Image (cartoon, grey):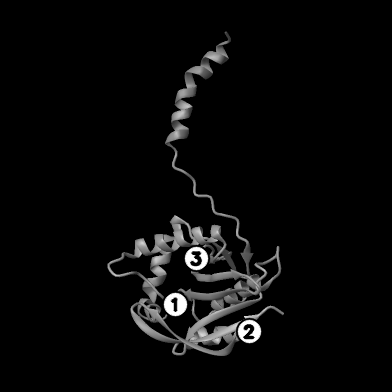
C-alpha cells in the first residue's frame, strides 16, 4: 500500500469535516428579465433587510395602496410570506412575482421594488393583473416606469421570449397619481371598470386600466 494512499486516508476525515462545516452558499437564480438599468429575480432570504427597509421608507403611503402585514404580523413574517408565495405561484404558473435590483454601477445590487403579474389565466384569452411598489428613495428617477414597461413587454411578448399574454390589467387607486402616471406612460388606458377593493381593512375605489398585445 503506497504512502500517498495512507496519507489520503488520514487526511480525508479532516477534509470532509471542513466541507460539511462550511456555510451554504446562496446561489442567485439566473434572471429571465433585465432592462437598461435593472435586473429582476425572485426574492431570496438575503433580501429581507433591504425589503423591510424599503417598506419603512414610505409605510404610511404603501398601506393606503397595497396589502401589507396582517394584524399582529411582523415585517419578517410578511417578507417570508411574500417570498414563499412568489416561489409557489411561480411553480403553479398562476403568477410572476419579481423583485428588481440595480444591475451595475455604484448602486449595483440595491433593491428597487416589487413588480408582479398575478391572476394569470390561460383560456380563450390569456390575461393577468399587474401591480407594483417602489422604494420611495428611487422615486423621480424613472426606475418605476422602466421596470413596469419591462414587465409589461415581457408579459405580452410571445413565447419563448415572454409569457405570451394577450392583455394585462391594473387596478389603481385614483388618489395614487404616481401609479396613474406610470400606467399611462407604459401604455395602459382606463377601460371604464371601477371596483371597491379591500386594502388593509379599508375599502378603496380602484379604476381598472388595461393594455393589449399588439
Residue 66: x percent and y percent? 42, 77
Q: Earlier in the sequence, mark 1 or mark 3?
A: 3
Where 35 falls versus 184 (above or below)?
A: above
Gap in Å between the C-alphas at discs 2 and 3?
27 Å
Marks 1,3: beta carbons within 8 A: no
* Label 3: which secondary element: loop
- The residue tagged 1 is 136
Residue furthest to the top: 1
- The residue tagged 2 is 187
The tally of labels here is 3
Q: Residue at x 59, y 83 (%)?
A: 210
Residue furthest to the front: 124
Q: Quadrant of residue 49?
A: bottom left
* Label 1: which secondary element: helix
Q: Earlier in the sequence, mark 1 or mark 2?
A: 1
Q: Quadrant of the N terminus?
A: top right
- The residue tagged 3 is 110
* Label 2: which secondary element: loop
The residue lying toward the viewer, choosing from 162 and 7, is: 162
Q: Earlier in the sequence, mark 2 or mark 3?
A: 3
Amino acid at each position: 500500500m503506497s504512502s500517498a494512499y495512507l496519507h489520503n486516508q488520514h487526511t480525508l476525515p479532516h477534509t470532509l469535516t471542513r466541507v460539511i462545516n462550511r456555510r451554504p452558499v446562496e446561489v442567485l437564480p439566473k434572471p429571465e428579465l433585465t432592462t437598461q438599468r435593472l435586473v429582476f429575480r425572485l426574492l431570496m432570504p438575503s433580501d429581507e433587510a433591504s425589503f423591510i427597509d424599503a417598506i419603512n421608507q414610505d409605510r404610511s403611503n404603501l398601506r393606503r395602496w397595497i396589502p401589507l402585514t396582517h394584524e399582529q404580523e411582523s415585517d419578517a413574517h410578511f417578507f417570508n410570506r411574500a417570498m414563499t408565495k412568489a416561489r409557489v405561484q411561480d411553480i403553479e404558473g398562476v403568477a410572476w412575482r419579481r423583485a428588481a435590483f440595480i444591475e451595475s454601477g455604484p448602486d449595483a445590487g440595491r433593491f428597487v421594488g416589487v413588480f408582479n403579474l398575478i391572476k394569470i389565466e390561460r383560456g380563450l384569452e390569456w390575461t393577468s393583473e399587474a401591480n407594483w411598489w417602489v422604494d420611495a428613495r428611487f422615486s423621480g428617477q424613472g426606475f418605476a416606469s422602466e421596470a413596469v414597461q419591462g414587465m409589461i413587454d415581457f408579459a405580452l411578448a410571445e413565447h419563448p421570449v415572454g409569457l405570451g399574454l394577450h392583455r394585462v390589467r391594473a387596478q389603481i387607486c385614483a388618489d395614487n397619481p404616481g401609479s396613474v402616471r406610470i400606467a399611462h406612460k407604459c401604455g395602459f388606458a382606463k377601460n371604464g371598470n371601477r371596483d371597491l377593493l379591500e386594502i388593509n381593512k379599508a375599502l378603496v375605489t380602484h379604476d381598472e386600466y388595461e393594455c393589449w398585445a399588439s
